Image: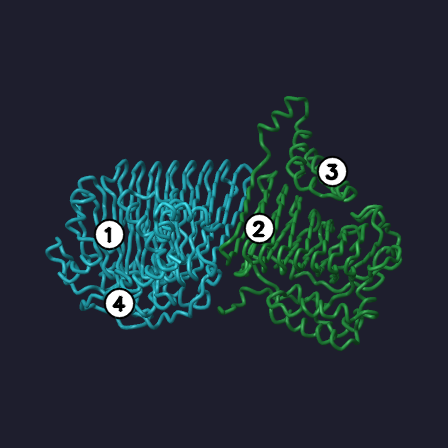
């Protein structure tokens, strides 16, 4: 009985507190009219004062997207009502004439929003040595630690700023990993992306700090179309952190971001994500649609790209951070925790495309389903004909909590080279009564026990996260599963 | 559902489909109203859904585009060389009691052999069963027909020519295997649509050995559908060898349902055909049902071999095991797709799957897609997949003990598939498999020597 009581209490407590980050800030937005057409694309481009080539690129993407209307991907194990792409706003910028040069110039209401979200910028500057390029709605408003980065030669700014200041770099790499024709959502993003982050780490430089950006979604009915581009030149290293929360909404919100990573010879990029956007309520009303294209190209020899993700939020997650291992001896890694509760749906995994010789990849995926949630691991490992001696190891484990959720594993393995070696293992299980009994015996509540066991289940992935994130992520793992046991 | 755009479909214009009315009049059971209506509905379903393109998830790795361009007609009765001896063709060996031979999809009474009449066992051709016991056949044929999105199954129902009907009464034991031989011998591209039905009554035991074989270099298409019904506590052993001609298409569908404590053991060897796909679906619909699927696939040159399985744990306490191993050489293409699906109420299932492939050449390709679909929480389920080449070190070890390179290679390939073959309990069948594997390996060796 006590377990039942605990659960009831926990559920009630959760309902009372509700979603901690659910609130709307009222800021006058500079908004484009509803709907999507060539004029809107031109409007966005003009608003941002973009060069002709970028407008042309956007228009090519838009025209392709328009032709593909019937080809919205349908293969993922997720279901949702059709999205009316004309019933959304594609541009909204916080009211601001010039970009603020310091925090003092930032709209005080914006700063208050950050306070509510628990990321006071001043504190963060001192605390962790993290440079924050905070994205509010679609335009970057504050960038810190710029000077120190500049000293090292690292370019870290919003992508709009990069278009202005480093057009040759952007033109060379934008769309080189995720072309505008890549997939339905990436094409949409290419046409209407508003902002995002740009990082360039020059040859031989080890970025002196973890780079971080926080995404927020604000202004009702604004889809977010972030575009991130990170280039690590020969022999350089960078670790990039991405984390996000979003205000509570009744209507679904679409988020279709594109992230492109390029690692040249001997370069290494570590990209970590903690995603806890609003997942909708217990009955699945509201919540974010997270349809993201993330891909990294290991172009150089001995280059390395490592993706680590903790996915706990969003109503629907459709996300496959991938590595194209072109350079000989290059390495790709994917560490993932996907937690779904209530009526959340996640179809996530990775693609490891082995092109070069002696390329190696590791995939560790932990999926946890509770309530009525559906969680799918979908991953591709492809060994191309020239990928001699390439290696892959994949492990996918699923944990089910409750008898009305689903956990699915769909790996795709394509091998065209006989000296390549691929190994895949997958298991599905539940939390055993023995484990629970052991923890309860020692005075832990059912909730605490589940959080502990699940954290243990996820340990291999959690330990890949940078320190700042690891602590937050562990708490999040416990929080996401509240109300799921009894 | 989503918009179904035309890129998901391949439109085929097979001459025999166009001539449906004329062809159907000569098929078994013509004149039975329910069957005539069913054939017509199935034809409409085929025309509506058309063949799947590679945009359809389940057909992602098997492309029917070239197949759809072949002007298939239906085999004319009596075609084929009457002097061809099929005695040694079957995998059942001399031990088989009943033997049913189908040539180009039609029952060949002359080559068949009826075993002794025994209590509790009925073995008939489908044509005969429709004449004599239509009421036994009807519910099964009707049950399989209304499936959406199954173009090949619909076409089989529209054109089912003949096949075997095996009914084992409750509690009966058939101790010697029943042998089925499907042979093809045609001059122009023809298609055959055999339909088999196996019903094992409560507590009964029966074994079947099914062989598909091509005679000469003919180009044809075999589209067999086999339904197996395993009643409570019954046990069915189903072995199949696919040795079609190098230019043949073999697209087979096996549907199995198991009631409580029913067991189904299947073994599949796929070695022939230019393009083959063997689909097996087993539904564990009773508590404690037990299903085991094993198989090997050997391919070379430009062969395409696809094994697609789906095991549905619909009731609690079921167990399933799958072990498939393949050896690919030349420019061949292997596909293994294995789904284990556990329904919400099917607690405590135990489902395991393993697929391993050996690649002998740099042009060969394996695409494997295991798929766990789990809706229950008290589950023990796992799958594994691996692909690689022969181990240099192991080869060196054997050669250092006096084997030449070719011998060492053959020993290692044999060892790789031995795990699957050794698990076959029936000795004559195991011998038949070993002989087939030997034949395949020596062809390999010869091809390597001549450098082709």
Rounded to the nearest whole Å, what is the CA distance between mark 3 and mark 1? 65 Å
Pointer 4 local density, CA inside 10 Å: few below 14, some 14–19, many at least 20: some
Looking at the rendered image, the disc whose residue lies closer to the viewer, 3 or 1, is: 3
Question: Upstream in the sequence, badge 1 or badge 4?
Answer: 4
In the rendered picture of this protein, how many numbered marks are placed on residues?
4
- Check disc 1 and report the residue beneath it: A162
Is the same chain shared between marks 2 and 1? no
In this rendering, the label closer to the viewer, 4 or 2: 2
In this view, the residue in front, A306 or A72, is A306
Chain coloured cyan in this rendering? A
> Label 2 lies in what chain?
B
* Mark 3 crowdedness (10 Å alpha carbons): few <14, some 14-19, many ≥20: some
One can see residue A297 in this view: no
Relative placement, left or right, of B303 versus A80 is: right
**Quadrant in the picture for residue A103:** bottom left
Sequence-first tag of 2 and 3: 2
Taking the spot 25% from the left edge, 40% from the top edge, the residue there is A207
At label 2, counting other C-alpha atoms closer than 10 Å, the crowd grade (few under 14, some 14-19, many 20 or more) is many
Q: Which residue is mark 3?
A: B438
Q: Are marks 2 and 1 in contact (CB under 8 Å)?
A: no
* Chain under callout 4: A
* Residue occupied by mark 2: B351
Q: Is residue B448 above or below residue B197?
A: above
Who's the residue at 70% across and 35% down the image?
Answer: B445
In the rendered image, which residue does mark 4 sit on? A43
């Amino acid at each position: 009985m006590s377990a039942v009581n605990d659960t009831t209490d926990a559920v009630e407590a959760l309902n009372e507190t509700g979603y901690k980050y659910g609130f709307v800030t009222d800021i006058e937005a500079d908004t484009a009219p509803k709907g999507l057409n060539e004029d809107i694309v031109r409007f966005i481009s003009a608003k941002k004062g973009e060069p002709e080539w970028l407008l042309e690129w956007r228009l090519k993407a838009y025209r392709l997207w328009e032709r593909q209307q019937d080809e919205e991907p349908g293969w993922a194990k997720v279901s949702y009502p059709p999205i009316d792409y004309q019933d959304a706003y594609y541009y909204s910028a916080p009211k601001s004439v010039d970009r603020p040069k310091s925090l003092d110039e930032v709209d005080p209401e914006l700063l208050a929003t950050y306070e509510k979200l628990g990321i006071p910028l001043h504190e963060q500057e001192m605390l962790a040595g993290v440079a924050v390029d905070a994205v509010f709605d679609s335009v970057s408003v504050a960038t810190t630690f710029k000077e120190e980065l500049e000293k090292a030669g690292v370019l870290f700014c919003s992508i709009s700023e990069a278009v202005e200041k480093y057009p040759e770099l952007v033109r060379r790499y934008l769309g080189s990993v995720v072309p505008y024709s890549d997939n339905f959502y990436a094409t949409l993003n290419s046409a209407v992306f508003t902002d995002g982050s740009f990082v360039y780490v020059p040859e031989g430089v080890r970025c002196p700090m973890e780079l971080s950006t926080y995404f927020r979604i604000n202004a009702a009915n604004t889809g977010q179309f972030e575009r991130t581009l990170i280039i690590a030149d020969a022999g350089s290293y960078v670790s990039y952190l991405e984390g996000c929360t979003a205000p509570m909404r009744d209507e679904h919100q679409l988020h279709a971001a594109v992230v492109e990573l390029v690692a040249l010879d001997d370069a290494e990029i570590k990209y970590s994500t903690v995603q806890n956007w609003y997942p909708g309520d217990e009955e699945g009303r509201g919540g974010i649609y997270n349809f993201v294209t993330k891909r990294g190209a290991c172009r150089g020899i001995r280059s390395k790209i490592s993706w680590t993700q903790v996915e706990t939020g969003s109503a629907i997650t459709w996300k496959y951070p991938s590595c194209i291992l072109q350079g000989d001896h290059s390495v790709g890694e994917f560490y993932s925790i996907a937690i779904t509760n209530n009526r959340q749906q996640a179809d996530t995994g990775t693609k490891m495309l082995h092109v070069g010789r002696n390329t190696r990849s590791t995939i560790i995926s932990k999926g946890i389903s509770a309530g009525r949630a559906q969680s799918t691991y979908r991953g591709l490992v492809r060994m191309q004909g020239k990928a001699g001696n390439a290696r892959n190891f994949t492990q996918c484990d699923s944990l089910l909590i409750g008898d009305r959720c689903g956990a699915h594993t769909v790996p795709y393995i394509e091998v065209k080279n006989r000296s390549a070696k691929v190994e895949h293992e997958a298991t599905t299980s539940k939390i055993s009564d023995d484990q629970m009994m052991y923890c309860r015996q020692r005075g832990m509540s059912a909730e605490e026990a589940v959080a502990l066991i699940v954290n243990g289940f996820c340990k291999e992935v959690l330990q890949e996260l940078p320190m700042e994130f690891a602590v937050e992520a562990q708490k999040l793992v416990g929080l996401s599963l509240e109300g799921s046991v009894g | 559902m989503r918009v179904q755009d035309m890129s998901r479909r391949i439109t085929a214009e097979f001459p025999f489909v166009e001539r449906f009315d004329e062809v159907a009049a000569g098929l078994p059971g013509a004149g039975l109203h329910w069957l005539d209506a069913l054939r017509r509905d199935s034809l409409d379903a085929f025309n509506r859904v058309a063949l799947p393109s590679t945009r359809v998830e389940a057909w992602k790795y098997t492309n029917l585009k070239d197949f759809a361009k072949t002007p298939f007609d239906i085999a004319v009765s009596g075609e084929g060389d009457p002097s061809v001896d099929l005695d040694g063709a079957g995998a059942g060996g001399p031990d088989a009691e009943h033997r049913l031979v189908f040539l180009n999809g039609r029952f060949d009474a002359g080559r068949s052999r009826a075993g002794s009449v025994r209590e509790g066992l009925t073995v008939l051709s489908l044509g005969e069963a429709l004449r004599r016991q239509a009421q036994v056949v009807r519910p099964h044929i009707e049950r399989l027909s209304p499936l959406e999105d199954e173009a090949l199954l619909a076409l089989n129902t529209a054109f089912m020519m003949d096949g075997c009907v095996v009914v084992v009464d409750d509690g009966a034991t058939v101790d010697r295997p029943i042998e089925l031989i499907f042979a093809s011998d045609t001059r122009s591209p023809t298609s055959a649509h055999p339909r088999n039905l196996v019903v094992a009554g409560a507590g009964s035991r029966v074994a079947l050995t099914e062989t598909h074989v091509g005679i000469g270099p003919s180009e044809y298409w075999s589209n067999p559908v086999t339904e197996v019904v395993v009643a409570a506590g019954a046990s069915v052993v189903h072995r199949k060898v696919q040795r079609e001609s190098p230019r043949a298409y073999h697209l087979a569908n096996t549907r199995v349902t198991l009631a409580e404590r029913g067991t189904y053991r299947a073994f599949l060897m796929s070695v022939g055909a230019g393009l083959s796909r063997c689909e097996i679906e087993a539904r564990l619909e009773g508590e404690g049902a037990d299903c085991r699927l094993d198989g090997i696939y050997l391919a070379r040159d430009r062969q395409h071999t696809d094994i697609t399985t789906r095991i549905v744990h619909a009731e609690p306490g079921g167990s399933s095991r799958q072990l498939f191993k393949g050896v690919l050489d030349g420019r061949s293409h292997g596909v293994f797709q294995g789904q284990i699906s556990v329904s919400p109420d099917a607690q405590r299932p135990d489902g395991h799957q393993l697929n391993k492939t050996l690649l002998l050449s740099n042009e060969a390709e394996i695409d494997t897609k295991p798929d766990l679909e789990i809706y229950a929480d008290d589950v023990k389920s796992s799958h594994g997949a691996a692909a690689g080449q022969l181990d240099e070190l192991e080869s060196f070890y054997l050669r250092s003990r006096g084997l030449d390179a070719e011998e060492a290679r053959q020993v290692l390939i044999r060892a790789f598939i031995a795990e699957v073959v050794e698990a076959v309990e029936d000795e004559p069948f195991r011998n038949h498999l070993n002989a087939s594997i030997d034949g395949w390996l020596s062809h390999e060796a010869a091809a390597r020597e001549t450098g082709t």
